Image (spheres, rainbow, N blue to C red):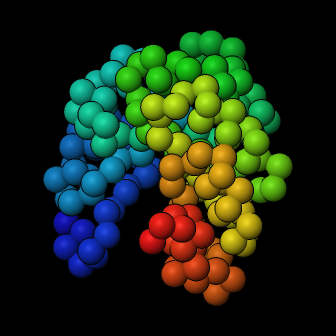
Amino acid sequence: GAVAGLVATPLQIAGGLESTEAIQLVFAAGATRAVVGMQMIDNPPLLRACLAAAGDWLAVGLDPRPDRLAAFPWRQAAPKKAEEIIDDLAAAGVMRVVLSHGGGPGEAGAFAQLVRRQPTMELTVAGGVRDLDGIRRLRDAGVAALILGEPLFSGAISLEEARSVADPRQ
């Protein structure tokens, strides 16, 4: 709760959230969004319980790269393509997905296809954006939000520039 009380921006918590109790704990501490990992995709009963606990404040983190999907230790099924996983998540009631490693030049087209495939799902991309062109590509692909780290910390992109490009109406 201490960090949430110090910032005037929504606080998203990801990593280590593997139970409804953990999700309830981060919300009690002031988080506005909880991101669960790919293991939830392979455990539908737990995913449903987490959705019941968090509703549309829950997001599922997914690394959509085929090699990462193939390497994940799936318990219930063979590896699926990102498109199939997104469809399964939408069918389960997930409204938000955080796609990691996705800001490279060749990936915006794939994300545009995911947006068209599940137009009511909010897709966030975390990682891979290096410049303002990356923000433009993802904005034009229909991605709802970006998580920027290194380009802001290094000064390659300012927060004001990023906001202006992400939403030109601002």
**Quadrant location of the N terminus?**
bottom left
Q: Quadrant of residue 112?
A: top right
Q: Nearer the viewer, residue 6 or 159?
A: 159
Q: Is residue 76 visible?
A: yes
For the point 71% across and 24% down, the residue is: 81
Q: How many marks?
A: 0
Quarter holding the C terminus? bottom left
In the picture, measured across the screen, residue 68 lies left or right of residue 159, that is: right
Picture residue at 73% right of the left edge, 48% below the top:
108
Up the image or down, 7 lies above or below 26; here it is: below
Question: Residue 49's spot in the image, x, y percent?
Answer: 28, 24
Is the residue 3 above or below the residue 20 in the image? Answer: below
Quarter holding residue 68: top right
Q: Is residue 103 visible?
A: no
- Is residue 43 found left or right of 155 in the rendered image? left
Left or right, 24 with reference to 58 = left
Choose between 62 and 91: the one closer to the eye: 91
Q: Residue furthest front?
A: 169
What residue is shown at x 74% (from left), y 38% (from top)?
110
Q: Position of residue 114 (x, y in %)?
A: 63, 33
